[in-house]
Amino acid sequence: MARIVIVGAGITGLALAFRLRQARPDFDITLLEAATRPGGAIWTEQQEGFRFEIGPNGFLDSKPTTLQLCRDLGLGDELIAASEASRKNRFLLLDGRLQKLPRGPFSLLATRLLSASGKLALLAEPFRKHPKEHKDESVAAFFRRRLGREAADVLGDALVTGIHGGDPELLSMQAAFPRMAAMEREHGSVFRGYFRAAKQQRLEAKAKGEPPPQPGRMWSFRGGLRTLIEALHDRVQPACGVNVRRIERHERDWLVRGEGNDTWPADAVVLACPAYRQAEIVADFDAPLATEISIIPFNRIAVVALGYRAGDIPVAPEGFGFIAPQRTRRDLLGVQWCSAIFPERAPAGFVLWRALCGGWHRGEVVDWDDDRLLAAVREQLRLAQGVTAAPAFHRIVRWPQAIPQYHLGHGERVRKIEQMAANHAGLFLTGNSYHGVALNDCTEQATILAGKIAGFFASGPSGR
């Protein structure tokens, strides 16, 4: 019986353990988690009738792996889709007021976020030459080259802020937004690639007798994302409150060491914890590998959940929320109108919002005390939405190491890390530090890695 120890019971570790047990019930799988609960940043809290997420607010259906995982867990009936208004209405806080973000290529031409010359630069995108060699470049450089400077300053910044909370001048386009980079590489144009992909999706839906897809819909559960975490917990039974200190390679197997005399022998070890923890665990075993892993930086985020009486909101918003671009250096990155996105997140007569603060350029905000942070958020809400009343409820959650930042050179660094890890048969590295920061990316990587591990043991002793 193959013994596999997985370190880290975030969504990647949980999904991996579940998929492995599905594929190979004969595997002996041990899942270890340092925290007192599984899920990592994914968790739903409920206080005073408000149900709010302390990490991701949901997941998109742009990749099938998370929805399929939910159905395989028997959670299909618990899924809820985000409101139609939240899919259509997203805003940018620019020049002191909320301005609607365009939803697609055609709406870009009608937006007030860009000048006439900025829109002309967009129209020219399909006719711009593309490089013969696609080298790593920043998100900002890619947007300037393909879509023009205005689009880079406004739309590129908004995209990066909303997903990564990072700096578009530092983030790698190929690592952070690989699908968009691939559109240029494969079709010579982002717009051309977008339209061809949309056409292909419509044709596939028609062939199946299904309605045309609605791109980028967000999903969650009636009870919040902890529903997924708790279902996985029940299936794979992780050991929580276990701190792994290091791993050791013996002649034909591994030894995972925890605190005190706790040890776990293994034929394969998977590190599914954040990169900074992986670096600590492998430091004694392979110092050069630990150094490469430790270079991956993380930003800092504070989540401020706010419950307001509906009567204290001048205009009830219908939509997803708004983003404050990083270049404006505001005291928040954006606000999500949670009870407008998913129903029943607030008691009757109240609304629930979440402000996200910090990010790459304003990490110091996370260190502010509660009173100062809450006052800063309230001031931004007064400016953006005219809200002057005090919230009836608030809760602040700080993430000192929140979202990994895929800076320039990230792709090459990941390839180097994976090559170095491959020198140690039975060692696997995964998690959102490498191939995508979103929940969808994690479940996709878990599915892929489960197949690799099954193949590793199927190769027999000679393969190991």
Image (cartoon, rainbow, N blue to C red):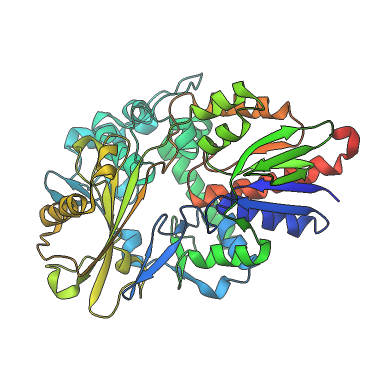
- Report the residue that reaches farthest toward the front: 260
The structure residue drawn at horizontal position 60% and vertical position 51%, both measured from the top left corner, is 242
Give the x, y percent position of residue 229.
55, 62
Give the x, y percent position of residue 390.
14, 65
Give the x, y percent position of residue 410.
50, 28
Q: Is residue 386 above or below residue 106?
A: below
Give whichever of 89, 235 is nearer the camera: 235
Q: Is residue 2 above or below residue 422?
A: below
Give whichever of 21, 101 is nearer the camera: 21
The structure residue drawn at horizontal position 56% and vertical position 33%, both measured from the top left corner, is 280
The structure residue drawn at horizontal position 36% and vertical position 73%, both measured from the top left corner, is 343
Q: Is residue 280 above or below residue 272?
A: above
Position of the C terminus, as image quadrant, is top right
Q: How many marks?
A: 0
Q: Is residue 339 left or right of residue 217?
A: left
Give whichever of 397, 296 is nearer the camera: 397
Give the x, y percent position of residue 131.
46, 20
Residue 408 makes an appearance in the image:
yes
Q: Quadrant of residue 173?
A: top left
Residue 209 makes an appearance in the image:
no
